[in-house]
Amino acid sequence: MFKQPILIASNNLDKTAELIKCFKDFKISAESYQNVITRLNFPNEGTTSYLNNARQKATFIFQKLPDESVLGDDSGMIVAAYPDKFGVQTSRQLSNYPSDADKNHYLINLVNGRSRQVTLRTDLILCVADHRVYHGLGVFEGTFSTTERGDNGYGFDKILIPLGETQTLAEMTDTEKTPYLHRTKAIQNLLEKVAQNEYEHF
């Protein structure tokens, strides 16, 4: 298996909290790497590959803590109406919008009168002892709502409606929305790779 708790290689506290919660649903212990060592500044992310960015974060912390299990992730948004925007650079392209509400209102207005289809992708890289690395992939498919709705969530949860549903993620209970979350799907895929011993060396 792998050593627990898994250390999350991220300085994004909201993302770290969500990953910890998602792992807990699978009865896996996880925590911030900052519980073990002081906060570090990560190298600049690339602009072309989710997988490479996730690998870079995981290996950066693993080099400091080679006896631990370290998880790196990278996520992005693919907006059908603007296929050349966002993607790997989603967080950087939305950096001018300081709050979740600012980002959500910008996206709602951006797709007004256009396709509302949206995909969110998460790549996870888990580095463990003996320099083994496992890759997990998760994808959310859905549409943007026309207004923010719901209170159970953060980030884009108030404007994302899963395919085949009418409620936003933030309008759903944790039990209802968890199966739709791209990070939950990525963790499930990652744990399947671990169970099947599908890994690479780095």
Image: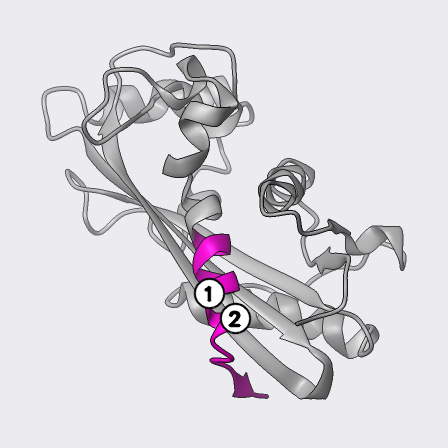
What's the magenta region? 186-202
**Quarter residue 163 falls in:** top left
Which amino acid is tagged 2?
Ala
Q: Is residue 49 above or below residue 155?
A: below
Query: Does the magenta segment cover residue 154?
Result: no
Residue under the point 31% across and 10% down: 147
Residue under the point 41% across and 43% down: 93
Badge 2 vs badge 1, beta-carbon distance below 8 Å:
yes
x%, y% of residue 14?
64, 35
Residue highlighted by disc 1: 192
Q: Is residue 83 above or below residue 131?
A: above
Quarter of the rendering occupied by the C terminus: bottom right
Residue highlighted by disc 2: 195
x%, y% of residue 73?
54, 58
Is the residue marked by circle 1 packed among few (<14), some (14-19), or many (20+) residues within 10 Å? some
Query: Does the magenta segment cover residue 198?
Result: yes
Is the residue marked by circle 2 packed among few (<14), some (14-19), or many (20+) residues within 10 Å? few
x%, y% of residue 143?
22, 29
Q: Nearer the viewer, residue 12 or 135?
A: 135
